[in-house]
Image (tube, rainbow, N blue to C red):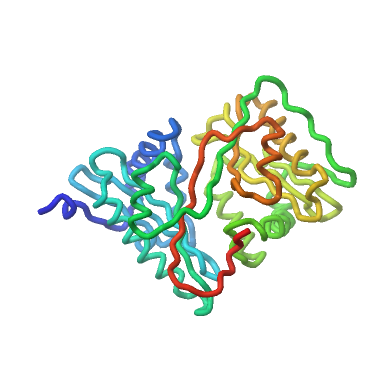
């Protein structure tokens, strides 16, 4: 038996979660010093109604046990872009054979989940990699993926209280109440992100389903009191959603999403939402706050964050592979 033949893939099982969390965190910690996921969070994938674990998740198993993980989440309509999360533990298990095995499984599954897309539409498969993770990146490139975007993780380390918010006239800011505000927030989210790179056009119903699943998956990490909506009458003009850093590190905050509707851009709302979020984290004793931003964002988000004192400290690359040519309906600006 060759070395490569000692590795097999099987459906991931709930009892694999502790081993999978170690695999994921060991690799992420190698390049960042941080953990990436907690056991309750990963367990939540088994509760996602869109996922069938026996079909959509796999475990890489070798002589030493579980050493890798893969998941391809079936996309909603229009089914044109599949995304996957893949990981191999650092060390002897991480080599050409294991990455190629995992990538081959993921691509086959991605082709399956995008097959329902209309035949005239282009379909694609996207993966992400930390810029420093050369081994992972080489695996993606061997499988025919190309870099299409860079995302920067930005951070501010507090040395003084943040500058208070100055809200634009005619807007009222209040804390997010998911039961009362979800539909209005989703309408703002769909419009605000419609033109962002990589966005797949979908319905408001799909927008709401995705946000509900995100909040469910966050579990205790999602604290609505860390999130603020800016209202113009009964319409949400923009919002900022916050949570503690993983794994529930209360000394580090995360701005998970910040959105401003096009009609309210260039009027100071983005700055007000950001500074309000920074101020709330500071009041709760956070030493720093982070967020992720598209390096080529055309709405000026990168400059907004820099003006608030944030700096880029890590880069995450988006890789993509075309599965089927056709008319591309994914936002590319």
Q: Using the image, determine if residue 314 lies above or below residue 140.
A: above
Residue at 64%, 49% in the rendered image: 297
Residue at 85%, 46% in the rendered image: 171
In the visual, does 15 lie left or right of 36? Answer: left
The quadrant of the rendering that contains the C terminus is: bottom right
Where residue 248 appears, as percent x and y from the top left, is 53, 34
- In this view, the residue farthest toward the left is 1
In the visual, does 301 lie left or right of 254? Answer: right
Where residue 98 appears, as percent x and y from the top left, is 26, 51
Residue at 81%, 49% in the rendered image: 231
The quadrant of the rendering that contains the N terminus is: bottom left
Residue at 40%, 70% in the rendered image: 112
- Number of labels in the image equals 0
Q: Using the image, determine if residue 112 lies above or below residue 307.
A: below
- In this view, the residue farthest toward the bottom is 119
- In this view, the residue farthest toward the top is 159
Where residue 100 appears, as percent x and y from the top left, is 29, 55
Residue 280 figure quarter: top right
Nearer-the-camera pick, 302 or 114: 302
In the visual, does 131 lie left or right of 166? Answer: left
Where residue 199 appears, as percent x and y from the top left, is 60, 60
In the visual, does 202 lie left or right of 160? Answer: left
Nearer-the-camera pick, 60 or 111: 111
Residue 34 figure quarter: top left
């Amino acid at each position: 038996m060759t070395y490569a033949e000692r590795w097999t893939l099987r459906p991931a099982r709930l009892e694999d979660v502790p081993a999978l969390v170690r695999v994921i965190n060991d690799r992420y910690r190698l390049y960042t010093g941080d953990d990436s996921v907690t056991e309750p969070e990963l367990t939540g994938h088994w509760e996602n109604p869109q996922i069938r674990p026996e079909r959509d998740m796999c475990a890489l198993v070798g002589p030493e046990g579980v050493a890798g993980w893969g998941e391809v989440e079936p996309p909603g309509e229009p089914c044109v872009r599949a995304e996957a999360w893949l990981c191999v533990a650092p060390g002897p298990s991480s080599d050409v054979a294991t990455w190629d095995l995992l990538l081959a499984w993921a691509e086959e599954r991605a082709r399956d989940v995008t097959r329902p897309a209309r035949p005239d539409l282009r379909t694609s498969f996207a993966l992400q990699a930390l810029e420093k993770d050369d081994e992972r990146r080489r695996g993606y490139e061997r499988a025919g993926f190309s870099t299409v975007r860079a995302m920067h993780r930005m951070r501010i380390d507090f040395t003084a209280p943040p500058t208070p918010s100055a809200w634009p006239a005619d807007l009222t800011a209040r804390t997010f109440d998911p039961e009362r505000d979800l539909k209005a927030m989703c309408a703002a989210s769909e419009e605000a992100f419609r033109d962002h790179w990589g966005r797949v056009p979908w319905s408001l119903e799909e927008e709401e389903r995705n946000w509900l699943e995100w909040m469910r998956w966050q579990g205790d990490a999602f604290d609505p009191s860390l999130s603020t909506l800016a209202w113009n009458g009964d319409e949400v003009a923009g919002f900022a959603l916050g949570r503690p850093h993983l794994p529930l590190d209360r000394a580090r905050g995360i701005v998970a999403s910040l959105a401003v509707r096009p009609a309210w851009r260039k009027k100071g709302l983005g700055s007000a939402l950001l500074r309000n979020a920074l101020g709330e984290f500071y009041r709760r004793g956070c030493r720093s706050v982070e967020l992720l931003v598209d390096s080529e964002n055309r709405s000026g988000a990168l400059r907004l964050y820099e003006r608030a004192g944030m700096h880029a400290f890590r880069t995450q690359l988006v890789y993509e592979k075309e599965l089927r040519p056709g008319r591309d309906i994914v936002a590319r600006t």
